[in-house]
Amino acid sequence: MMSKPLQSLWDDSLANSMSEPELLKYRSNLLGSDLRITNYGGGNTSAKVQMSDPLTGDDVTVLWVKGSGGDLGSIELGGFSTLYMDRLEQLKQKYRGLEYEDEMVALLSHCTFNLNPRAASIDTPLHAYIPHTHVDHMHPDAAIAIACTKDSRALTETIFEGEMGWLPWQRPGYDLGLKLEAMAKSEPHLKGIVLEGHGIFTWGDTSKDCYLNTLTIIQRAADWLAKNNTSAPFGGEKLAQTLSADERRSVAARLMPLVRGKVSSGERKIGHFDDSAEVLQFVNSEQLGPLAALGTSCPDHFLRTKIRPLVIDFDPLAADLESELARCESQLDGQLASYREGYAAYYERCKRDTSPAMRDGNAVIYLIPGVGMLSFAKDKATARIASEFYINAINVMREASGVSEYVGLDEQEAFDIEYWLLEEAKLQRMPKPKSLAGKVAFITGGAGGIGFATASRLLQEGACVVLADIDEASLAERGAQLSEQFSADVVRTVRCDVTDEVSVGQALAVAAVEFGGVDILVSNAGIASAAPIEETSIELWDRNLDILAKGYFLVSREGFKVMKRQSLGGSVIFIASKNGLVASQNASAYCTAKAAEVQLARCVALEGAPIGVRCNVVNPDAVLRGSRIWSGKWKKERADAYNMSEEQLEEHYRQRSLLKLNVFPEDIAEAAYFLASDVSSKSTGNIINVDAGHAPSFTR
Ligand code: NAD
């Protein structure tokens, strides 16, 4: 579980000059930056600090504790809530018992120190009442493994030789805070407490002591497991790993659009694929079926992953993989439906009078023997994090079942957390999704001027984007720029030559594996060339027709196939040119190819309509800024054709336009966004000219 032991990263030379709140932040960042110590977004830390009351000037004790939301690894001081300890003590008089736990959460805000707007989390009382100055609550896989065994109490005693207390499973809340207090007070020698099925609390007199104690306790658990877990993981290997990494990705690329389509009816989902060693060991093991059925246990895990995954019926050892895939696909509807029925039955069995309505019944995690794990959620980060949490759960199951018997969380307890009114309130407070949330856009020529502007526009509206381009250096640069601006989760780049059938197929497979499919296809990769007709060589002619006509055809044909498999409709957008409608001097090859694009778009619109795939054209004209077409030979050729200098061209085009305006890549991107979004859901086979007005190009 831990290839290298945990090592203290505490640096006294940094820490010595820090205030107590700064030390708490420092400790939290150190703890949260190592996933062996706590999972993403999981765990919390606190310090009880002497401060001056802003109103009275009196010296008061203030609880600084990680607030609701956020992650320890990156928390800033503003991420902590601050509460008067004396008021938190007074709260005890208000507590009416287990059934009234939730009302205590509302009362926490009455204890706020210094008008701090950061909402206090549900775990606040757990930190407040432990009678130690510095407290950590972590979710390390090693300790959760012990907390999730049938005999977790006895194991805790053995491993920690009485230095860690143990409390039976209980939903986090006010009452658990009181139980932690009682145990820590009555057994002052304890260094921490294991919470069954959940995680650990540890403490110290100084921030540094607390940090070191936390590391020591986790390492003790990991060392004990390393020594005592000698059995073959998950009951041993059932399937030898026969599929190569490429084959696994290609199975995932084939299945993901299909699954995505089938689980996106309520809300469109984004996919994530993982075939790390831990995942493969689990999906190829003897105990995959029974352990997956037991479900996850730490609340942090199942809130993200749903209580159980769905194991897809697939035999990677089948002699004929193609027919096995076809068989697997034909079983999918039945498997997905029975998962949903199981979820609805769980909801019916466990619901209470006050429970919120049933949420989406589809699985989040899909395990495929020999292939890996898929996850689907409302956005990429949520899907990725869900899969990381399931890897935590796999680690926990491997260790727990290796030294004892793994125990999943009781169904009713799981339900009460999943449908907790406070969780529901959190969901209700979430901002409305952006207009392209849950959608995947594939943009050819994405490293160029118009492609890049379109990518930025679609990302702003919540889409995930794949930039496909032949120019690898620009791709890397543009991809990094967008990742920096919008997050690495939502941006992918792929080298693609649109004239090459295989390359286009592979690029779309990247969209399928990385995000689950494609909803918006922007065919835009292009070049421009000029030559009088007698000087137009076969080579120049073919180059234009290859990239612009054949390229647009291949991209729409392959994209069409993915959209059809998803059954979620789609929007295909061709960035053509006004030259597709009107002839232009000395550009016969380019104009002909652009006209072919316009006609092809109409054909795609016609054949796409029955499956909800729309296809429309945007015709730019004279987009000089940002476009690399205009930084090459084309600019000189155009200037020569109009008998002027290159510098005069932009003004020439502005004057030539009816509106006397220049056209920029962002203007084309805006039209592409309109056609990509549902606002234009009733438009197909159309052309939007974005050329500042050019009468000969008026469509008719
Ligand atoms: P650009 O040169 O900035 O971008 C085009 C991109 O396509 C480049 O990144 C290039 O590497 C890529 N590309 C070229 N060949 C490729 C191939 N075989 N496979 C994959 N990628 C390839 O140009 P732009 O102005 O952004 O043009 C985008 C589209 O808009 C083109 O189709 C162009 O014809 C059209 N258009 C542009 C203008 C304009 O004035 N800029 C006017 C009308 C139409």
Image: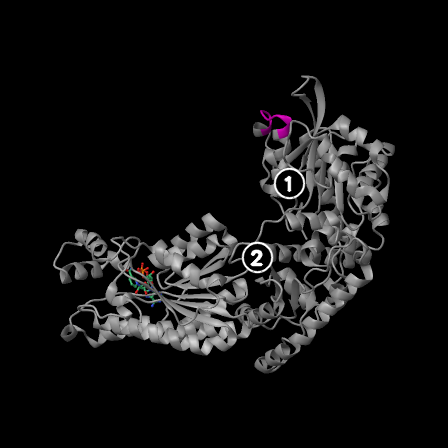
> Quick one: 9 or 576, which is closer to the camera?
576
Tell me the kind of residue under disc 1.
Answer: Leu
Label 2: state its secondary structure: loop
Q: Residue 3: x, y in percent? A: 64, 51
Quadrant of picture, ligand 1: bottom left
Left or right: 276, with 444 as reference point: right
On screen, 627 above or below 23?
Answer: below
Q: Earlier in the sequence, mark 1 or mark 2?
A: 1
Q: Tell me if I can see residue 473 in this picture.
A: no
Segment tinted magenta in the rendering: 15-21
Percent x, y of residue 94: 83, 34
Residue 240 picture quarter: bottom right
State the image coordinates of residue 645 (x, y, percent, origin top left): 14, 54
Q: Residue at 56% of width from left, 57% of height from top?
A: 380
C-alpha gap between disc 1 and disc 2: 27 Å
Q: As shown in the figure, which amino acid type bears the numbered disc 2?
A: Asp
- The numbered dot on residue 31 is 1
- Read off the residue under disc 2: 379
Left/right of residue 438 with respect to residue 672 in the rendered view: right
